[in-house]
Amino acid sequence: MTDRDDADLRAHDLNLFVVFSALMEERSVTRAAKRLHMSQSAVSAALGRLRRAHGDPLFTRVPHGVVPTLRAQRMQGAVAEALRAMHTAVGGARVFEPERDRFTLRIGMSDDLEALLMPRLLSRVSPAAPGMSAYGVQTNRLGLPALLESAQVDIGVVANSAWNSSLRHRVLFRSGYLSVYDERQLGPRAGFTLDEYLAIPHVMVSFDATRGIVDDELDKLGLQRFKIASTAHFAMAPLLLRQTPSVATVPSHVARVFADQYGLAVFEPPIDLPDYEVAAVWHQTRNEDPEINWIVDTIEELTKA
């Protein structure tokens, strides 16, 4: 570190970054003040000093709190890493006891994986970790890196990808695709031929209501399907299938959840669809965090059960 760097640090009150971190997590001056046992005016004053030091508003007011600016989002990963290092330097390596500690885990994932994991976390893990709160944050593999870099989530569980050097991952399981339908609408079937599959209306799950993996594969065969409806949320699919004679082709892990929870019938779609890996992903700065190691191990165990 240079003399210039030392001078820059002396010009900052490093306690301000504790306030910054609380604001990033709470997104509210009131909640941050309560968490830090400070007055709202003291938090507001600290925020003013941060703004002057960084030449940026850092947080802008919205009806129910504050939202971070792009500068604040880019700062968050480095600030969080520095605060964790300071905690370790002052107090030594922290002991994590899930059965006793109160802690919140923010997990970025799409709702198909949330349907698979959240009920298992609550029913099987909560008794062993009664102080745990698990918050699902809607995202996918494209949106996850920004959430991890800004510390808006602790880990992600998403389709595996080529991650940048700041991210670490562990493959949890392989998934593919299955089709589901309501036998009360279509009647019991042993399976569907390709012609029968295409003759049935399809419920598509698509973020932008344009196309899905089935359409990509059908294009290769010069074929099309009739999509009676599209939804951005997997949770809507079984509700729609209960109301109309139709079929939905979804990731196999959520198809089995639908079969168990809604009594839907499951079959192998009569076209070749690719398998893919699902991974837990976290930022490299959290590598030594006991909470991260614990939740990754726990989720891996749950997905293999």
Image (spheres, rainbow, N blue to C red):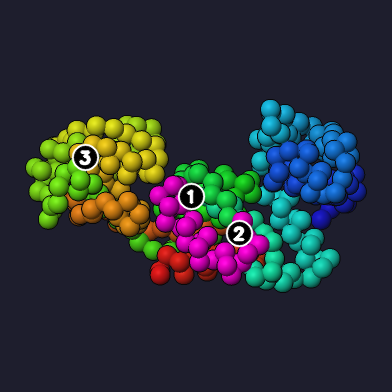
Q: Which residues are magenta?
A: 109-133
Q: Secondary structure at mark 1?
A: strand
User: Residue 33 is drawn in which quadrant?
Assistant: top right
Residue at image position (81%, 46%) is 34
Separation (CA) of disc 2 from disc 1: 19 Å
Tag 2: amino acid: Gln
- Which numbered mark, 2 or 1, is in the foreground of this view? 1
Tag 1: amino acid: Met
User: Residue 96 is drawn in which quadrant?
Assistant: bottom right
Q: Secondary structure at mark 3?
A: loop
Name the N-terminal-most of marks 1 and 3: 1
In the rendered structure, the answer to whether residue 30 lies left or right of residue 285 reads: right
Tag 3: amino acid: Ser
Residue 131 forms part of the magenta stretch? yes
Q: Residue 122: percent from the left, percent from the top?
A: 52, 60
Give the residue number, with chain letter if any, for mark 1. Answer: 109
Q: Is residue 254 above or below residue 224?
A: below
Judging depth in this view, the residue of 114 and 47 nearest the camera is 114
Separation (CA) of disc 3 from disc 2: 44 Å
Q: Residue 23: percent from the left, percent from the top?
A: 74, 42
Residue at image position (82%, 49%) is 36
Q: Residue 5: percent from the left, percent from the top?
A: 84, 49
- What mark, if any, has residue 246 been given in the picture? 3
Q: Residue 10: percent from the left, percent from the top?
A: 90, 48
